[in-house]
Image: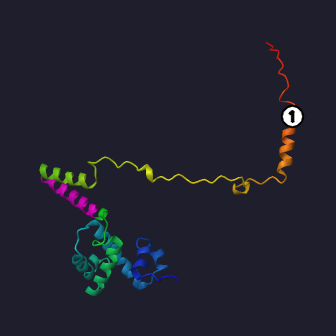
Amino acid sequence: MKQELTVYEKIEKHLFKSKSDAELVLGEREMEIKQRLMVCVSKKMDNPLMLDSELVVFMMNGCGGTAKAVSQAQAYNDISGINKIVGSVQLSAKSWYRYIIIEGAKTGYEIARTQGDAKGMAACLDKIGKYTRADKDDDAFDWNQMIPPSFEPSDDITLLEGIEPIENLEMERKNFRSMFKGNLFKKAEDAIIEP
């Protein structure tokens, strides 16, 4: 039984597709939601530390003029879809937190650089190095995880692609042997080398 997609899952599949392509699949109401989600996902990716409440106010005010204003309830519904697309902050993996820390350290580095704060710059670079693991050697590949293929010997020629079995194999072998019979013990003759 095929499970029905939620509105947000349906929109996520077509989130950054062109308007004409998305309209083939999404209805008018879904296109409005898609417009809001596109703006909000981009905003959340640009500023991962943005609070959900700030994003709610942003949507209630029409996403800076790029979408229709929505009610607070609709904005909170959209937040769950946005967090699912971006990667829910509560359920996200370490890589999402690393991303947030690295982006914050980059911003801190720029602020420290403009203020001429060498200590601040060094501290930010230290954080970036730590969370990108630039201070550690690359992990060696674990060769024990590579399992060689298991081959089973067989005399069945039909297992190989492109090779047809020979109808009367023993007769073919006998004919092949007869081609060389008698030639094996023939004496070698000296060749005359001509200049």
Q: Does 178 appear above or below 168? A: above
x and y percentages locating residue 168 in the rendered image: 85, 52
Magenta stretch bounds: 97-116
Q: Residue furthest top?
A: 195
Q: Is residue 156 left or right of residue 62?
A: right
Asked whether residue 9 is drawn in magenta, I would say: no
Q: Nearer the viewer, residue 111 or 80?
A: 80
Q: Can residue 145 be seen here?
A: yes
In the picture, residue 76 is in which quadrant?
bottom left
Q: Amino acid at mark 1?
A: Lys
Q: Is residue 102 left or right of residue 148?
A: left
x and y percentages locating residue 48 in the rendered image: 26, 67
Q: Residue at x 30, y 85 (%)?
A: 74
x and y percentages locating residue 21 in the rendered image: 48, 74
Decide: few, some or many residues near mark 1? Use Cα within 10 Å; few <14, some 14-19, many ≥20.
Answer: few
x and y percentages locating residue 116 in the rendered image: 12, 50
Q: Is residue 76 left or right of residue 116?
A: right
Q: Nearer the viewer, residue 120 or 161?
A: 161
Image quadrant holding the C terminus, namely: top right
Q: Nearer the viewer, residue 89 or 56?
A: 89
Q: Nearer the viewer, residue 158 or 104?
A: 158
Q: Secondary structure at mark 1?
A: loop
Q: How is the image coloured?
A: rainbow
In the picture, residue 63 is in which quadrant?
bottom left
Q: Which residue is mark 1?
A: 181
Q: Residue at x 41, y 78 (%)?
A: 9
Q: Residue at x 27, y 73 (%)?
A: 90
User: Secondary structure of the magenta portion, mostly?
Assistant: helix
Q: Can residue 116 be seen here?
A: no
Q: Residue at x 28, y 66 (%)?
A: 46
Q: How many marks?
A: 1
